[in-house]
Amino acid sequence: MRTLQAGLGIIFVLCLPILLLTSGVRVAINEIRLYEYGFDKYEISLLRPVDRAEMAEIARELIVYFNSEDELIGDRLRQVFPTRREIIHLWEVKRLIQLSYRVQEIALVYTFAYLALGFACLRKAFLPKLAKAVLGGSVTTIVLPLILGGLALFAFNWFWWKFHVISFPGSDYWILDPEKHNLLRMFPQGFWFDATMLVTGGVAVAALMMGGGAGAYLVVRQRRDRPIEGQ
């Protein structure tokens, strides 16, 4: 039984960074303000055949497409991204996003199952075990954004190239020309650098808060249970 509990706890520790990272990605993908921030920062004021005022609507349609079951983009998006390379790459991105969603959902289900089983079997005795697992998962999570954020900060060109090579094996549709493809003009590399730093930073902050809470609980509990001298 102890071996089983330890195994489930280890899986939870590994599951927590996956859950936080995929949740951060999901929030970013669906946050229209992130898109608008990029449009403003990089002064993307003209994108044939739409102007800056319409770009937020295009971004919203992209969000709908990424979250839908439709394999093909709508007519309006096809007008904005008319080339075969853009259409296929959008489909590839959609598949990657959907995969991230499924991984997040699996991690979330396991997290709830671990919590439910732990409290059902151990009741209050599960709290210190959970706190230790959360602390371990938080530390693991903080290390991951530090690595990703460091790579993005000091070698983003390499990081971004490697990400595409790994994420889209055997495909070169992600290689676009800003002179020909609106998709690259609308989302320049600087936008993706900012988005990467935002997601990794947000994940690190969430992990710090969770780990800090778990660590504080363990310290308070240790002090409470420490025998008083002379007794």
Image (cartoon, rainbow, N blue to C red):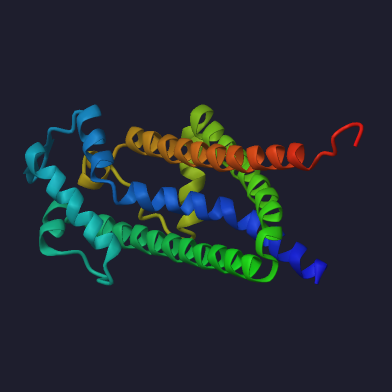
Residue closer to the observer: 228 or 193: 228
**Residue 47 is at least partly visible in this image:** yes
Residue 203 percent across, percent down from the top left: 49, 42
Residue 135 percent across, percent down from the top left: 66, 45
User: For the C terminus, which image quadrant?
Assistant: top right
Where residue 89 sits, quadrant-wise, is bottom left
Residue 3 percent across, percent down from the top left: 81, 67
Name of the residue lying farthest toward the right: 230
In the image, 125: left or right of 19?
right
Residue at figure coordinates x 49%, y 59% from the top left: 169
Q: Is residue 111 above or below residue 174?
A: below
Residue at figure coordinates x 41%, y 50% from the top left: 25
In the image, 123: left or right of 161?
right
**Residue 181 is at least partly visible in this image:** no
Circle count: 0
Residue 104 percent across, percent down from the top left: 47, 61
